[in-house]
């Protein structure tokens, strides 16, 4: 049995909703304070809201 076979994962969002993933420029990527990543040389950021209110400044992965 794999060591992680017994691990369970639960997604608790408490009203936080992922609004989308956007491909951005290097400058926008550098300025973004939330979730961001690079895949195949392209820069991406994630945007989320808290129960439909204002966009969150930081999103934890």
Image: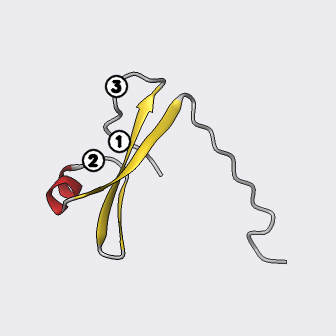
Q: Distance between the Cα atoms at labels 2 and 3?
A: 15 Å
Q: Residue sitting at 30 percent across and 69 percent down?
A: 42
| Callout 1 secondary element | loop
Quadrant of the image containing the N terminus: bottom right
Q: Residue at x 47, y 41 (%)?
A: 18
Q: Secondary structure at mark 3?
A: loop
Residue 41's x, y, as percent? 30, 75
Q: Residue 55 at what x, y percent from top left?
A: 34, 31
First reached walking from the N terminus: tag 2 or tag 1: 2
**Residue drawn at x 81%, y 63% as measured from the top left:** 6
Q: Is residue 53 above or below residue 11?
A: above
CB under 8 Å between discs 2 and 3 = no
In what element is the residue under mark 2? Answer: loop
- Contact flag, marks 2 and 1 (Cβ < 8 Å): yes
Q: Position of residue 40 (x, y in %)?
A: 36, 76
The residue that label 3 is drawn on is: 54
Q: Nearer the viewer, residue 24 or 38?
A: 24
Which label was assigned to residue 58? Answer: 1
Identify the residue at horizontal 24%, vertical 49% (top origin).
Answer: 32
Q: Residues within 10 Å of mark 3 (few under 14, many from 20)?
A: few
Mark 1 and mark 3 in contact (Cβ < 8 Å)?
no
In the image, 30: left or right of 36?
Answer: left
Which of 58/38 is in front? 38
Mark 1 is surrounded, within 10 Å at the Cα level, by few (under 14), some (14 to 19) or many (20 or more) other residues, namely few
Which residue in the protein does label 2 denote?
33
Instruction: Report crowding for label 2: few under 14, some 14 to 19, many 20 or more residues within 10 A (C-alpha).
Output: few
Of all residues shown, which one is farthest toward the right?
A: 1
């Amino acid at each position: 049995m794999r060591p992680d076979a017994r691990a369970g994962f639960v997604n608790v969002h408490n009203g936080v909703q992922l609004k989308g993933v956007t491909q951005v420029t290097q400058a926008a990527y550098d300025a973004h304070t939330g979730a961001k990543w690079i895949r195949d040389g392209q820069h991406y950021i994630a945007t989320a809201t808290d129960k439909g209110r204002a966009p969150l400044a930081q999103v934890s992965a």
